[in-house]
Amino acid sequence: MIGYMKCGKKVILIKYHLSSVKIRDEQIQALKKEVDNLKLVIQEQKDMPSLDKIRQQIKVFKEKWRYLESVQERNRLLKRIVGKITYHREDNNVYLGIQYN
């Protein structure tokens, strides 16, 4: 009976250890996902032009936009300002990023 109790305690300890390892693995995975998301944000911020450059491009854009008649001309003008639009979806949230030229 004493041998069985010792063995039973070991089984309980092993089960507890395995469940805590599983919980820690889940926490680690969640943290890795958060780190990856932050890396995306940092990369997008590195690629951003200065505020003055964006203001200048918007000013030029507004001046030219009103004189353009065709959709193709407007698309070309937009492509000169906007380099890339990215999105990241997480649950019910969508995060948009605009990379300017």
Image: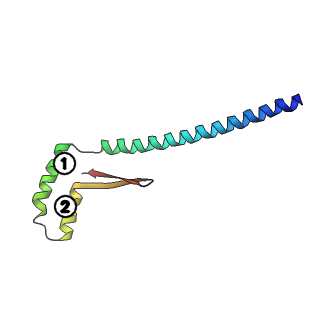
Q: CA distance from mark 2 to mark 1?
A: 14 Å
Q: Residue at x 29, y 52 (%)?
A: 98
**Contact (CB < 8 A) between labels 2 and 1?**
no
Q: Secondary structure at mark 2?
A: helix
* Residue 52 percent across, percent down from the top left: 16, 43
State the image coordinates of residue 17 (x, y, percent, origin top left).
Answer: 68, 34
Residue underneath mark 2: 77
Query: Residue 3, located in which quarter of the rendered image?
Result: top right
Residue under the image location 11 percent in, 64 percent down = 66
Under circle 1, the secondary element is: helix
The residue mark sitting in front, 2 or 1, is 1
Which residue is more in the foreground, 26 or 52? 26
- In the rendered view, does 10 fall on the left or right side of 76? right
Q: Which residue is labeled 1 in the image? A: 54
Mark 1 surroundings within 10 Å by alpha-carbon count, few (fewer than 14), some (14 through 19), many (20 or more) = some
Residue at 21% from the left image edge and 60% from the top image edge? 78
Q: Amino acid at mark 1?
A: Ile
Say the numbered circle drawn on residue 44.
Answer: none
Question: In this view of the protein, which residue sits in the foreground, 21 or 11?
Answer: 11
Please give the name of the residue rendered at 11% of the width and 61% of the height, measured from the top-left corner: 64
Count neighbours of disc 2 (C-alpha within 10 A) and say few if under 14, some if 14 to 19, many if 20 or more.
some
